[in-house]
Image (cartoon, helix red, strand yellow):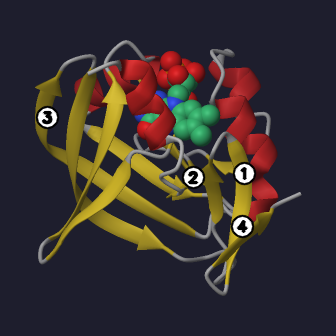
């Protein structure tokens, strides 16, 4: 099976856009991720799939903590910046981030934030499947629309129709 065809098919899987954050010692790190999925409601848990070579994945393996920030359509610039290999200071300069000692940063404009502690890590090819027990959920920004990504473009989800986000 050729990976180009696989990627072509996966481009059609519309997904909610998140930024996953963590602490790397004294520094904060984060990356844009769509491979995030609810796992179980009791106890609350979720999973995400991160490339093991990413700085964020390495930080989560070490710290055993991460936060999943579900982006809103106003956060396209945040999504773009966190999908790059820019230095953390440059990434966290985009958006209003809440940084507390010992915790993963969370984004004020995120439509939901899940704080997690790692319960299991599964290695699979280039990626790690990180299973997180959800320790807190923030819905501070209100019930805004979610930012979506499909076919290489960002969009927003309104009444089951994907429309351009910006
Ligand atoms: C829309 C979109 C979704 C992405 N989803 C994932 C993902 O689910 N897992 C992943 O490991 N990388 C994903 N990436 C790529 C990372 O954001 C990118 O490799 C980032 O530069 C890694 O940053 P870091 O090495 O500083 O942690 C995605 C990129 C984009 C644009």
Callout 2–callout 1 Cβ contact below 8 Å? yes
How far apart, in angstroms, are the residues tagged by discs 2 and 4?
Answer: 10 Å
Earlier residue among tags 1 and 3: 3
Residue behind mark 3: 121
Looking at the picture, tell me which residue is in the foreground, 148 or 163. Answer: 163
Check disc 2: other Cα within 10 Å, few if <14, some if 14-19, many if 20+: many
* Helix, strand or loop at mark 2: loop
User: Comparing marks 3 and 4, which lies closer to the viewer?
Assistant: 4
The alpha-carbon separation of the residues under discs 1 and 4 comes to 7 Å
Q: Give x and y (percent) for residue 7.
A: 45, 30
Label 2 – label 1 distance at C-alpha: 9 Å
Which residue has dot 1 on it? 154
Q: Earlier in the sequence, mark 2 or mark 4?
A: 2
Q: Upstream in the sequence, badge 3 or badge 4?
A: 3
Res 22 visible = no
Helix, strand or loop at mark 4: strand
Looking at the rendered image, the disc whose residue lies closer to the viewer, 1 or 3, is 1
Q: CA distance from mark 3 to mark 2?
A: 22 Å
- The reply to whether the residue tagged 1 has its Cβ within 8 angstroms of ligand 1 is yes
Q: Quadrant of the C terminus?
A: bottom right
Q: Label 2 CB, ligand 1: below 8 Å?
A: yes
Task: Answer few, some or many: residues within 10 Å of disc 3's Cα (few below 14, many 20 plus, some between 14 and 19).
Answer: some
Taking 33 as reference, is 125 above or below it?
A: above
Q: Are marks 1 and 3 in contact (CB under 8 Å)?
A: no
Q: Residue at x 70, y 23 (%)?
A: 89
Which of marks 1 and 2 precedes in the sequence?
2
Which residue matches tag 4?
A: 156
Residue furthest right as drawn: 166
Determine contact: label 3, label 4, CB under 8 Å. Answer: no
Indicate which disc residue 17 carries. Answer: 2
């Amino acid at each position: 099976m050729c990976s180009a065809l696989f990627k072509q098919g996966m481009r059609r899987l519309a997904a909610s856009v998140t930024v996953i954050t963590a602490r790397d010692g004294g520094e904060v790190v984060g990356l844009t991720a769509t491979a995030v999925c609810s796992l179980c409601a009791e106890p609350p848990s979720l999973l995400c799939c991160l490339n093991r070579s990413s700085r964020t994945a390495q930080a989560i393996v070490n710290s055993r903590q991460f936060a999943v920030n579900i982006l809103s359509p106003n956060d396209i610039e945040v999504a773009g910046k966190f999908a790059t290999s820019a230095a953390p200071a440059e990434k966290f300069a985009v958006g209003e981030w809440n940084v507390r000692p010992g915790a993963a940063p969370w984004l004020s404009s995120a439509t939901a934030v899940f704080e997690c502690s790692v319960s299991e890590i599964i290695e699979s090819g280039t990626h790690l499947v990180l299973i997180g027990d959800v320790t807190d959920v923030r819905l501070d920004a209100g019930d805004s629309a979610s930012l979506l990504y499909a076919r290489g473009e960002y969009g927003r989800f309104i009444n089951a129709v994907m429309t351009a986000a910006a």
